[in-house]
Image (tube, rainbow, N blue to C red):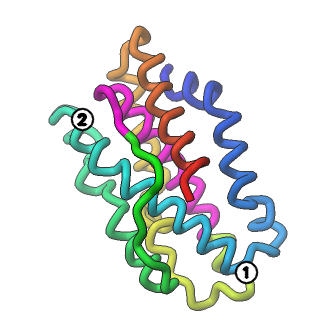
């Protein structure tokens, strides 16, 4: 199954992202508003430079099965930027996906961050200093986070043939690399 293949082969990237964003501080309640601004800003740049490219690379078949219209996150994170008084910026790196399979791999990174973001939002909402924060991006699916992730994984695992796994992994690595190096 491609979802397991991706999980195993991107674990180092995932760990590096958690380290970059000081994720351990979220759970010991030492995560600050400045830490949060960094994670929102970086995720904003990732979405700004990838979301349209991913969605435009996917066929109508995937657009329908994945309910792409319900997965747009850029307008949500722009609300977070505004509420945090952060400026919209452009990234210093370019990003391109060579085919639909790479786009699916990149989407895996974004959908996975949504899954983790839901946990982050719940934890931070109980942390001092975050009383006024609205978690538009991290709370984007609300109670549908689990079903949306499950749907995404099922479509990947059902529709991606094994010979395309390396391309899907390539897309995931491209987006992780962008996320880890953009600022």
Say above or below: 181 vs 5: below
Highlighted magenta segment, given as a residue range: 96-121
Residue at the location (45% across, 59% down)?
45
Q: Position of residue 129 (x, y in %)?
A: 70, 88
Secondary structure mostly seen in magenta is: helix
Q: Position of residue 32 (x, y in %)?
A: 73, 78
Give the residue at mark 2. Answer: 58
Q: Is residue 27 magenta?
A: no
* Residue at disc 2, secondary structure: loop
CA separation in Å, label 1 and label 2: 39 Å
In this image, 119 relative to 58: left or right? right
Occupied quadrant, residue 162: top left
Quarter occupied by the C terminus = bottom right
Total marks in image: 2
Q: Is residue 108 magenta?
A: yes
> 165 or 49: nearer the eye?
49
Give the residue at mark 1. Answer: 127
Occupied quadrant, residue 59: top left
In this image, 70 relative to 157: left or right? left
Q: Earlier in the sequence, mark 1 or mark 2?
A: 2
* Residue at disc 1, secondary structure: loop
Q: Position of residue 21 (x, y in %)?
A: 69, 59
In this image, 130 relative to 56: left or right? right
Say above or below: 24 vs 181: below
Say above or below: 54 vs 105: below
């Amino acid at each position: 199954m491609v979802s397991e293949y991706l999980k195993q082969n991107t674990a180092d990237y995932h760990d590096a992202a958690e380290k970059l964003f000081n994720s351990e501080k979220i759970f010991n309640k030492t995560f600050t508003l400045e830490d949060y601004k960094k994670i929102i800003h970086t995720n904003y740049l990732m979405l700004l430079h990838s979301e349209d490219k991913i969605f435009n690379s996917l066929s109508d078949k995937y657009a329908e099965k994945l309910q792409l219209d319900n997965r747009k996150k850029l307008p949500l994170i722009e609300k977070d930027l505004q509420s945090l008084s952060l400026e919209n910026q452009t990234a210093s790196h370019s990003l391109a996906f060579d085919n639909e399979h790479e786009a699916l791999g990149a989407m895996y990174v974004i959908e996975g961050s949504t899954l983790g973001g839901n946990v982050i939002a719940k934890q931070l909402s109980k942390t001092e200093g975050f009383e006024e924060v609205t978690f538009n991006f991290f709370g984007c699916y609300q109670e549908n986070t689990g079903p949306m992730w499950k749907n995404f994984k099922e479509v990947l695992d059902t529709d991606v043939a094994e010979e395309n796994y390396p391309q899907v992994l390539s897309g995931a690595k491209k987006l992780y690399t962008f996320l880890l190096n953009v600022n």
